[in-house]
Amino acid sequence: MVFRWIEASALAAAIRQSTWLYPFIEIIHIVGIVLVAGGALFFDIQLLSAHTKPVIESRYLLKWSKRGLLLALPSGLLLFTTNAMALSNDPVFGLKLLLLLLAAFNAWLFHVRVYVPAKWATARYHAIASIIIWVSIISCGRLLAY
């Protein structure tokens, strides 16, 4: 099985056996999540509080979310390698991955079809969905630790 091979890899073993490497990668992952989810959540809150105009001035938050993704994704993959067998069978991990796909789809749909002033009322639904999804993703991540 591929997950057994991933977990048995030299990279996974090195991360598991190192005193500092796993915690360092975990810190990078958490910082990435803070940037991804934090930027998205602040943007969503700004979007929900706007009355009639687009929140163009808040777009810089989404740049931070993209930067956070550059930290969270590779560090999450590295953390996965250390416990691939157990995580691949954990329904909470599966739910987290599904929610991440849903967050990506929601963001894509928002930027491709909604992020125009004429559809600003529809954008609020995407903001609410985004908030719910990101809180759920973070919750799943915390539940995986127990």
Image: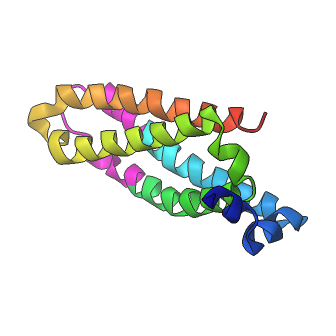
Q: x, y percentage for residue 6?
A: 67, 64
Residue at 51 percent of width and 63 percent of height:
70
Q: x, y percentage for residue 73?
A: 54, 58
Q: Is residue 80 left or right of residue 126?
A: right
Residue 92, image quadrant: top right
Q: Residue furthest front?
A: 1
Q: Is residue 124 left or right of residue 104?
A: left
Residue at 34 percent of width and 31 percent of height:
127
Query: Is 124 covered by the magenta stretch?
Result: no
Residue 42, image quadrant: top left
Predominant SS of the magenta segment? helix
Residue 143, image quadrant: top right
State which quarter of the image contains the C terminus.
top right
- Count of numbered circles in the view: 0
Q: Which residues are magenta?
A: 42-62
Q: Look at the image and name its color scheme.
A: rainbow
Question: In this view of the protein, can residue 27 be seen by the observer?
Answer: no
Please tell me whether residue 43 is drawn above or below residue 52 in the rendered image.
Answer: below
Query: Is 53 covered by the magenta stretch?
Result: yes
Q: Residue furthest left?
A: 118
State which quarter of the image contains the N terminus.
bottom right
Q: Is residue 55 left or right of residue 82?
A: left
Question: In this view of the protein, can residue 80 be seen by the observer?
Answer: yes
Please tell me whether residue 28 is drawn above or below residue 146 in the rendered image.
Answer: below
Please tell me whether residue 24 is drawn above or below residue 133 in the rendered image.
Answer: below
Q: x, y percentage for residue 63?
A: 40, 58
Q: Which one is in front, 11 or 76?
A: 11
Q: x, y percentage for residue 48?
A: 33, 27
Residue at 74 percent of width and 72 percent of height:
11
Residue at 73 percent of width and 70 percent of height:
9
